[in-house]
Image (cartoon, helix red, strand yellow):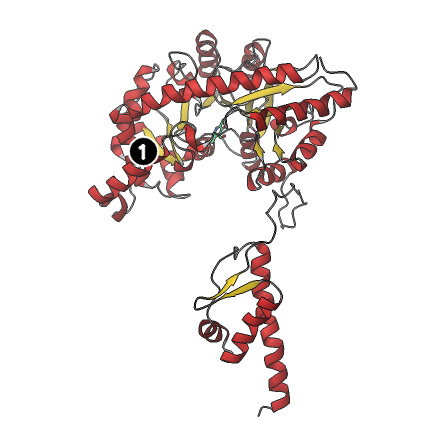
Amino acid sequence: MSVAGSDKENQGSRYRQIAGQIKQAIDDGTLLPDTRLPSVRTLATQYRVSMTTALKTLRSLEDDHYAVARPKSGFFVAPLSRPQRAQPLVIEPSRQIAPLDEQTELHLAMVGTDCRVRLDLANGARSLYPVKKVGLLMRQLGYSKPFLLGDTVKGTGYAPLKAEIARRAIDYGCNINPDDILITNGCIEAISLSLRATVKAGDVVAVESPCYFVLLQMLHNLDLRVIEVENGQEGYVHVGKLTALFQRKAVQAYVTLANINNPSGKSIPNEQKAYIARQADEHDVMIIEDDIFGDTAFGERRPFPMRAFSPNAILCSGFSKTVVPGIRIGWVHSSNYMRKIASLKYTSTMGTSVLPQAAITELLRSGGYDAHLRKLRRELASQICQMRAAVLRYFPPGTRVSDPEGGYVLWVEMPRQALNVRTLFIMARNAGIGIAPGHIFATDDRYDHCFRLNAGFGWNKEVEQAIEQLALWCRESLAVQPR
Ligand SMILES: Cc1ncc(COP(=O)(O)O)c(C=O)c1O
């Protein structure tokens, strides 16, 4: 039996409870400004309260400036009274049961938060990519070939795309059977599958140093040990040190960014690739190659991958750096491990969406891809050139900057006495400037004076000012005057 007084009290606390939940969703950003809130009737049904309590809930949100009532339309989340600022980067220690290492925490924070000047990731402005064309192709294909959406995804990928990839591979020295290609969700999945198919926990993997940080995290997550082989004078991996590891049987695999390395931007010359590949074959070292930037090489011809020099090398690539970043279509080719790779794919992500594969196929077939690549390379080369000149202009003497042969990024080495890049990173972030700090490119502190810059978002006053500001902090830390 209910008592009138306590019922009223219940109703009273109930509306506050419901309002509290809605406020929380607004504060968290789950409910964005101007989103329509549930009607009185819907709220009453959802929360099993009377219409009066539901109305009281909405009115209380209005009183607290969380909601506004619009005549004949209902209640809406109040528009923001002040413009939203980019959030400063907060890297909190993980509260998860399995805490992440500092590198991974920082990487996730970097990717997950916005900043005003995006110099941290290796990607480009939307205007660099044929976004509209790919969107149109997807729409047309969705209509003309409904099976691309309506059928279950089976097998190792869209056969016409695999045929196109194999056809293009001939141009860069690789004779590949389309059956030995599997389409993946981005190049990262291709590398992950290749590692899982060929090495086991505890094995040792050689990488080039500085090393693309996602790769380091991946090796760590797969319980693999890593040996970082530093680049030589020429800017690519020290071939003598690398092959000595092969000869000593110190490593089971070598994961390489032999073409347009991230972050160095260099490619290993063909002669050296051939030597490394021979040595790997002779000493039973598995080569897994990340060729995602191969097609962005600035020269007339894109460089040959390691696979051109050994049929045993596993080749991974994709279209997220060339066609459109959001498409997430990658691929892996292996002459020897395809069945294992396919079975791992099946038990992880099963398959890859077919419609985007079909759109890329059309782009490759029509010649649209080549025309687009020519433009992309030209624009990236010019953007890199301008950013590089600014780094040399503003940073103090003793600063070194890479001279990339393709891709999006520059590697900057400040004088060793300059401020630690971890400090620079936080200062930059708080000023709305994103950089990729050097320490995430290694397992130790050897790159604490380095950082990577992304030139993909074009050259403009804001970017130039950001470089100037970074340089100023660097100079101030050295207490030297501008050149
Ligand atoms: C060297 C390298 N490999 C792979 C990737 C990711 O490729 P995808 O987006 O196709 O998974 C990136 C992205 O920055 C990269 O720099």
For the residue labelled by badge 1, is the local secondary structure a helix, a strand or a loop?
helix
Residue occupying the point 58% across, 32% down = 117
Pick out the residue farthest to the front.
71
Which amino acid, mark 1? Lys
Q: Position of residue 398 (x, y in %)?
A: 70, 12
Residue 359 in the image: above or below residue 304: below
Pick out the residue farthest to the top.
271
Q: Is mark 1 within 8 Å of ligand 1?
A: no
Q: Position of residue 93 (x, y in %)?
A: 68, 45
Q: Nearer the viewer, residue 438 or 113?
A: 113
Residue 228 in the image: above or below residue 58: above
Left/right placement of residue 242 relative to residue 129 reads right
Pick out the residue farthest to the left.
144
* Quarter residue 387 falls in: top right
Q: Position of residue 354 (x, y in %)?
A: 30, 40
Q: Which residue is mark 1?
A: 133
Residue occupying the point 25% across, 26% down = 365
Residue occupying the point 77% across, 23% down = 477
Residue 191 in the image: above or below residue 235: below
Q: How many marks?
A: 1
- Which quadrant holds the N terminus? bottom right
Whether residue 94 is visible? yes
Q: Position of residue 151 (x, y in %)?
A: 25, 47
Q: Residues within 10 Å of mark 1 (few under 14, many from 20)?
A: few
Residue occupying the point 48% across, 72% down = 43
* Quarter residue 198 falls in: top left
- Which quadrant holds the C terminus? top right
Pick out the residue farthest to the right.
479
Q: Nearer the viewer, residue 409 or 254?
A: 409
Whether residue 259 is visible? no
Residue 69 in the image: above or below residue 373: below
